[in-house]
Amino acid sequence: MPLYVERRPERLITGEGVRTDGRLPYEMRPIKMMVGVLERADGSAFVEWGGNRILAAVFGPREVHPKHMTLPDRALIRARYNMAPFSTPERRRPGPDRRSIELSKVIREALKPAIFVENYPGAVIDIFVEVLRSDAGTRVAGINAASLALASAGVAMRGLVAACSIGRVGEFIVVDPNHDEDMWGDSDMPMAMMMESEEITLLQADGTLTEDEFKQALELGRKAIRFVYEVQKEALKRPYQLVERGVGRLS
Amino acid sequence: MPLYVERRPERLITGEGVRTDGRLPYEMRPIKMMVGVLERADGSAFVEWGGNRILAAVFGPREVHPKHMTLPDRALIRARYNMAPFSTPERRRPGPDRRSIELSKVIREALKPAIFVENYPGAVIDIFVEVLRSDAGTRVAGINAASLALASAGVAMRGLVAACSIGRVGEFIVVDPNHDEDMWGDSDMPMAMMMESEEITLLQADGTLTEDEFKQALELGRKAIRFVYEVQKEALKRPYQLVERGVGRLS
Amino acid sequence: MPLYVERRPERLITGEGVRTDGRLPYEMRPIKMMVGVLERADGSAFVEWGGNRILAAVFGPREVHPKHMTLPDRALIRARYNMAPFSTPERRRPGPDRRSIELSKVIREALKPAIFVENYPGAVIDIFVEVLRSDAGTRVAGINAASLALASAGVAMRGLVAACSIGRVGEFIVVDPNHDEDMWGDSDMPMAMMMESEEITLLQADGTLTEDEFKQALELGRKAIRFVYEVQKEALKRPYQLVERGVGRLS
Amino acid sequence: MMFDQEILTHNLMKEYIRDLIEKGQRLDGRGLYDYRPIEVLSGTFTKAEGESWLRLGETQVLVGVKADLGEPFPDTPDKGVFVSNVELLPVASPTFEPGPPDEGAIELARIVDRAIRSADAIDLSSLVISPGKLVYMLFLDMYVLDYDGNLEDSLTLASLIALGRTEIPEVELKENGELEVRETKRRLELRDIPINFTFVKIGNRMLLDPTKEEEGVCDASITIAINGEGKVCSIQKKHGTFKMDEILNMMSVARAKWSELAEIVRGAI
Amino acid sequence: MMFDQEILTHNLMKEYIRDLIEKGQRLDGRGLYDYRPIEVLSGTFTKAEGESWLRLGETQVLVGVKADLGEPFPDTPDKGVFVSNVELLPVASPTFEPGPPDEGAIELARIVDRAIRSADAIDLSSLVISPGKLVYMLFLDMYVLDYDGNLEDSLTLASLIALGRTEIPEVELKENGELEVRETKRRLELRDIPINFTFVKIGNRMLLDPTKEEEGVCDASITIAINGEGKVCSIQKKHGTFKMDEILNMMSVARAKWSELAEIVRGAI
Amino acid sequence: MMFDQEILTHNLMKEYIRDLIEKGQRLDGRGLYDYRPIEVLSGTFTKAEGESWLRLGETQVLVGVKADLGEPFPDTPDKGVFVSNVELLPVASPTFEPGPPDEGAIELARIVDRAIRSADAIDLSSLVISPGKLVYMLFLDMYVLDYDGNLEDSLTLASLIALGRTEIPEVELKENGELEVRETKRRLELRDIPINFTFVKIGNRMLLDPTKEEEGVCDASITIAINGEGKVCSIQKKHGTFKMDEILNMMSVARAKWSELAEIVRGAI
């Protein structure tokens, strides 16, 4: 018997493109990032993004356990995306479900291309993404945090991976969908890129997009990811400090 | 809430021995067998028997994994009997239950005596029986399919194992019980034999049989198994072709 | 839908300290112990204590399986506390629950200090406590049985571990709480000691105790444990025989 | 695993046992068709509605029957629920490990269960309180405490005794739908005594009631249940192969032995 | 594991395949954007309400749609329940092991499921019998029988065919609350045909419908679903990276191929 | 495992720590009965009804209290449900692995839970909406983020703060049986402040608030809960042994320290 019942807002966006949280289609939610929040992990980062609170930690390169999973010529990369029981309005039972198993896989595949795995033969790098509070876009927020954690762990990387979601609400293509848009919007397209090379390392989509809408979404995604990337770079330069951005308007 | 409710037929057999599917006590359901239906398995076979559809595949002899199960002086034989979720009127949840765990064991023990296990020290032979559609007698149909799959994988064998069930419906001993007889009949006795040596490799019974009934059932079983064995031999000779038998009357 | 509903007795103790089973605060329930009830185990013991029936068995020192748990310089000690499905008024589902996992840990830690673990480098000693019938105080009864089983297995020990619970019912500190006191009493404090050195190897408490009550309980526990210890010693001297004590009054 | 020929008995012992049996002798001096001594311990060891602690040689089992209330299965609204479960406790053998029942334990439970059901030894329709809604559920929990072979027969005997001793609290379903559990108890009626007989084949000899060592060296094994009318009510061939005439011979032996074992069950109830 | 570049194809074969593809050729002679032959077997293989056994080259899948009755999810009281599940049977590959679905099987199920849901191919509100209380539950069980690459597209095609063939028993909820299952059946309407197109990148070439070997040597892989209106209705990049223009190119190829595959689905229903 | 002496701290470090402590000194300069600095972070980190992120030295824990509605347990129809759970997140230590709570996590949860229950710190009967039918369920989820010893005390402190901060939506059970969740919230009352004090014995010295290294070298460890009236309300000896007088001494220390820690809890609520 839930104490919290979600209700669809009367409208998700006005004719002028004002969204349920007051943002315009090309505006991003406030972001805060901090590198180095944990003492035991080899690297860690904390990301606030809208109402999301995400903790990422990296252990390794270290010995693989169980041993039979060792890869002789490169590092094994493992990732786990996990939602805390108190991260959602209704309490979630601990343990992986099908969604989190899929997200663990796509997060691993979003980050692996950025790692020089051949530098660490026989080792494992473990990436943990802990969602403490969820508010739409946890996987992209988690990739941003995990990418910082990898870098702060000193893992050799081709570049930082930055990520953002693009949504469609009626005829509007919107950046960084909020909770309402995530629940009742028409499409959702999480993306991640290595910004230096503009290589896409995560791309998923849900809901329908025409060819034009898709192109528009892809382009907007690129801009949003560049925006996030700049915040990441600053956070890496100033470990143990909270780097903040208010609502960000993309050009 | 099931969409399908089973109802017991008014009578399972007439005074003249006519069964609910029109067969007489000593008549078998139509059988089709085909060897070599799968590309990746080392050996495979498909069996239609009445409404049953059974797929069997064999992998090996190959390396044992996990290694600590290796037997130094002979092959390890493993068997898995598995029912597809769509094999029954009501959807079955995937995964083993107590019945399928027991059947996996008796199927393994029905086939193992036929394999020259000492020819493959340290190796494993994996036998998979997949029930795609079930209609009474899946274990014996599965043994027939698996025996063909073993032979087609080139595993050295003492002989083919053939199998059939015998039932009792009131005072009638009947061959190859159908679904109604399996559900509401008085006894069920699945049997398997290596026909060349007439050694029994599977024998189970459920429900009661007098001494005479049991002897009669055993003898009828032997005849039915010989019938099946002939079909098997033909299927082995003509791989990739469907070998068919209509309703078979045993003498 | 339970067949058995527990009801709290109108009062747990009279003003004169008479308990629901007729005992006075310092009286213990009847105890029977027998060493050597099982044939396969390296050591075993059976304990009746009030309505409790506990079987303990020890295997080892033997090789550790799985191997990666081996400790190079001493024995690995494992303990399992398990309640039989028929040990409680309502049937219990087999398998560990959170309570039995905790009790397995505290039992292991109650016994380990008594074992010369450094005598058996690389080996494991497995301790199994099976509760066949439960009637308050199963963990302390289990420790008593397991300690006997260890000794009868010939494991080198600093001394026997003996155990008893102390309870509080209103203003009375009582020894060896019964089922009613366990369910509805005010405090429960299981204890175990190595009697020779008077070292405490188990101490837990639940419910509140003032400083004075706690001291009183600790002292009463020591006496009760000494009482139990004497029974244990006799049982060890006379294996395969049931050593009995009626209601025991502590001075 | 222990039900399989994979058990490792030392090779020398294996040969010795086989040689003896070729001469018609057993390590413990028994005849080929003799059971080891069967003892039913007296005392209360569980909180079950019916129980029995039985020794067959050095094999020890403890069986408890617990009753509960619940809904019947949808396809048998007019029958109580009867569930059988075997636990091979790690105390019973150095080779048993804690954990959920493996294939050996599951097969054992089904062998005992099948004999009891096929013989209609328990009248499941007598366990109905309100058809389709409320029935007694009987849980037959079989605990293996000490393993020296032939769990099939020892568990079956102990189960029959425990069932025969079972007394369950009477309940009344009142008109207002409330349930009253009474102080009085009713005895479960054991309508038949289906006995399981486990044989192993060593060389060309058939042996009844195998020990752990005999199970370890045997070429084939089978369990046959015979009921009070001399009917077969369940068979489970385990590993190895048998000829038809071997099976018919064992069945005759089993039939002849039925009274001896049924007497033990009856005497213990 | 098989969806990952971790697969070990022999190194020589890997080089050979890559060299060929650099020249725009494939091991089996296909064009880069050609599918292998697709065959839908005729016959009844399951007890499902709708089924399809499909071969794509040497990949074989069997999909069954089972209907059941149940309660809707609390947050969608006016929709039926639709559940997708993939089993990578151990018969399909020496590298598949029995057990619950791993991340590969779960991702596959979600790829098929997402395409069907995004395109609204099934009208879930037509599956309601009594809002908030009783709905049809459809279970799409996808069985992989033989694995030679591109399970994404083969499972999607087989699923669409099985759904299009599905006939479910009609039921009536009577006024007294009782449920009557009728003899008559209703056909499930397939409202759209969302096709998944799986590409792999090898060097700088994009290939459609990869074989197991091509999956094993590829640098990146992606699955794109296109519906009947030419809209993207789901994307799943798997391992590796793509450039934006590469994705736009693959999308054009997929759009152009839609009719060819939709025709196969329509023809088989 | 980490609660056991099995932890491998390098032997030299072990000796060094032990030598220091023999002299009454600790590696970080603290007195034997001093706690490390305790910090309660400000901010909103969860969606819980009450939460607290607490640092004890380099140990970090995050505790959330979620409320839900449900049925009470049959044997306590007039009490709400209170469930405690500890997750040793793999981010907290290289030795923690993902998966269900192991014995260490379960013991931790029970240590915190037992202190709170024994002290009646939460009035469970105030959580009843309709006796026997509907109650609030409180889930105390304790997340270990960074492990540097003494999880017992840090989790207890953070749990008390989170509980003290908890505000749950008010609900009304209407006459027609419908449930209305109101906008207004009620504060959970924390009726007592039972503090857990964890000591380890090294040589013959007792130390309060052990670090990971001190846990690793200690000879014995124990957790004692003291409530606002100075009563013991829970004890858990973990590994090793203690003498009776050692326990009485630690209890006096704990009693004397209670106000200091209770003040931190009160200050943070």
Image: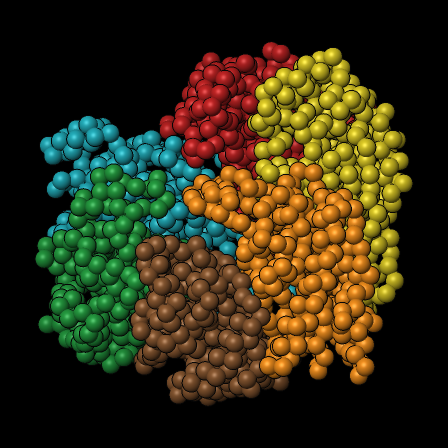
Chain colours: A green, B red, C orange, D yellow, E cyan, F brown
Question: What residue do we see at 55% from left, 18% from top?
Answer: B114
Question: What residue do we see at 16% from left, 33% from top?
Answer: E18
Q: Position of residue E156 (x, y in %)?
A: 35, 45
Q: Nearer the viewer, residue D162 or E15?
A: D162
Figure quadrant of residue A53: bottom left
Q: Is residue B169 above or below residue F158?
A: above
Q: Is residue F242 left or right of residue C243?
A: left
Q: Is residue B119 left or right of residue A153?
A: right
- The quarter of the picture where the C terminus of chain A appears is bottom left
Q: Specify whether residue A97 is in view.
A: no
Question: What residue do we see at 39% from left, 67% from top?
Answer: F22
Q: Is residue A209 above or below residue B178?
A: below
Q: Position of residue B141 (x, y in %)?
A: 57, 28
Q: Nearer the viewer, residue C19 or D170?
A: C19
Q: Position of residue E51 (x, y in %)?
A: 46, 41
Q: Specify whether residue A43 is in view.
A: yes
Q: Is residue A250 left or right of residue D228?
A: left
Question: What residue do we see at 25% from left, 38% from top?
Answer: A72
Figure quadrant of residue A101: bottom left
Q: Is residue A231 left or right of residue C64?
A: left
Q: Nearer the viewer, residue D157 or E47?
A: D157
Q: Nearer the viewer, residue A51 or E215?
A: A51
Q: Is residue E114 above or below residue D40?
A: below
Figure quadrant of residue D183: bottom right
The mark total stands at 0
Q: Position of residue C231 (x, y in %)?
A: 74, 56
